[in-house]
Image (cartoon, grey):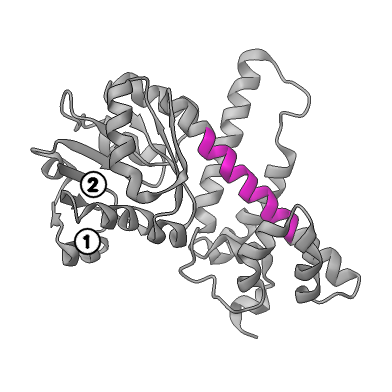
Amino acid sequence: MRIAFLGTGRMGTELALHLIPDHQLTVWNRTSERTARLAEAGAKVASSPAQAVDGAELIITSLFGPEAVRESVIAPGIIPRGVPWVDTTTVSPADADEFAAAVPTYVGVPVVGSLGPARAGALGVYVGTPDEARRALVLDLVAPWADPERLHGVDSGRRAATGKLLANLALAVSAQGLREALALGESAGASAEETLGMLGGTGLAFIAGMKGPFVRGERSTDGGDFTADAIAKDAYLMIDTVDASADDAGPRPGTDLPALRAALASLDAEIAAGHGDDDFSTILLEEAEHTGE
C-alpha cells in the first residue's frame, strides 16, 4: 500500500522501518532530521502532513500526545474521506472517542513496550475499531510490530486506549515501587545489587529485571527506551480520565490513583532537574549517578 506515516520520533521510526519492505512509505516529522534513517531505508520524505497524505491509501500517526494529534491531524482536517487512519499515539479513552467522531475511519492502535521490543517486532499492540473489515486490515498491517500473543483486536479506539493506559500505569507504579524498595534496602544496609536480587521472587521482579542495568550503571539513561517526559504525559492522561469520571458520577473511594500520583511526583522532579529526555529509570538514580560523581 501507499502509506503516509506522520511522526518519526524514537518509536515511530522503529514502527515505520518494519513497513518499508512491503509498502511505499512517505514520512513526515516536525523535526525533519528525524526522518533521516527512514529516508536511507527507502522512504520518501514529505515537507508537510498534507503533502505526506496526498495519494495515500492509509495514514499512520505516531505523535507525542493528543494535543499533537489535534494540531497536526484534526484541526487541519488532513485525513481524506474513506482513508483508514491508524493512530498509534497514546491518548485517553475520551480522546479516542473524540477522534473517532471527527474521522469515521479512525483506528486506535496504541503499542505497548519500549524500543527494544519495537526493534524485535515483539510489542503489545491493540487495534481498536468497530469496523470489522478495517480491524482485520490493520491487524494484518501491524503484525510485523507485534508479539503474536500480544496482538489484540478490540471493538473501539476507547478500549484500545484503555488497554495502553493500564499497561503504562502498571509500569509507572512498579517503577515507583522499585524506587522505594531500593531506598528501603539502602536504609537496611543492603546494596542496590543485593536489593535487586532479593526482589527476584516478588511482584517487583519484572521491573527489577528490566531496570536493573540502569541501576547498576550498565546502561545510561541518556537516550533510553522510554523517556520520563513520555510516561509522565501518559500519567496525566490517566489522572484526567479518572478525574473526568469522578466529575460525571461523583467521587468514589480509591479512585484518586495515589500510587500513580507518587510515581508522577518522582517523574516530575526528574523532569524539573533536566532529565525529562532520559529513560524514566532516572527516578531510580541519585543525582551523583547522573553527573558521574
The residue to which callout 2 is attached is 5
Q: Position of residue 77 (x, y in %)?
A: 21, 29
Q: Give the farthest residue toward the top.
A: 249
**Label 2 neighbourhood size at 10 Å, few (<14), some (14-19), many (20+)?**
many
Q: Position of residue 228 (x, y in %)?
A: 54, 57
Which residue type carries mark 1?
Leu
Q: Residue at x 59, y 65 (%)?
A: 273
Q: Residue at x 38, y 61 (%)?
A: 119
Q: Nearer the viewer, residue 267 or 207?
A: 207
Q: Quadrant of residue 65?
A: top left
Q: Quadrant of residue 217?
A: bottom right
Q: Residue at x 61, y 84 (%)?
A: 292
Q: Nearer the viewer, residue 38 or 6?
A: 38
Question: Dot 1: what SS?
Answer: helix
Which disc, if any, is residue 38?
Answer: 1
Q: Are marks 2 and 1 in contact (CB under 8 Å)?
A: yes
Q: Is residue 176 magenta?
A: yes
Q: Residue at x 79, y 59 (%)?
A: 201
Which range of residues does the magenta coloring cover?
163-178
Q: Give the farthest residue toward the front.
A: 149
Indicate the quadrant containing the N terminus: top left, top right, bottom left or bottom right: top left
Whether residue 223 is situated above or below residue 93 in the rendered picture: below
Instruction: Please give left or right for residue 121 compared with residue 79 in the image.
Output: right
* 3D distance between C-alphas at marks 2 and 1: 11 Å
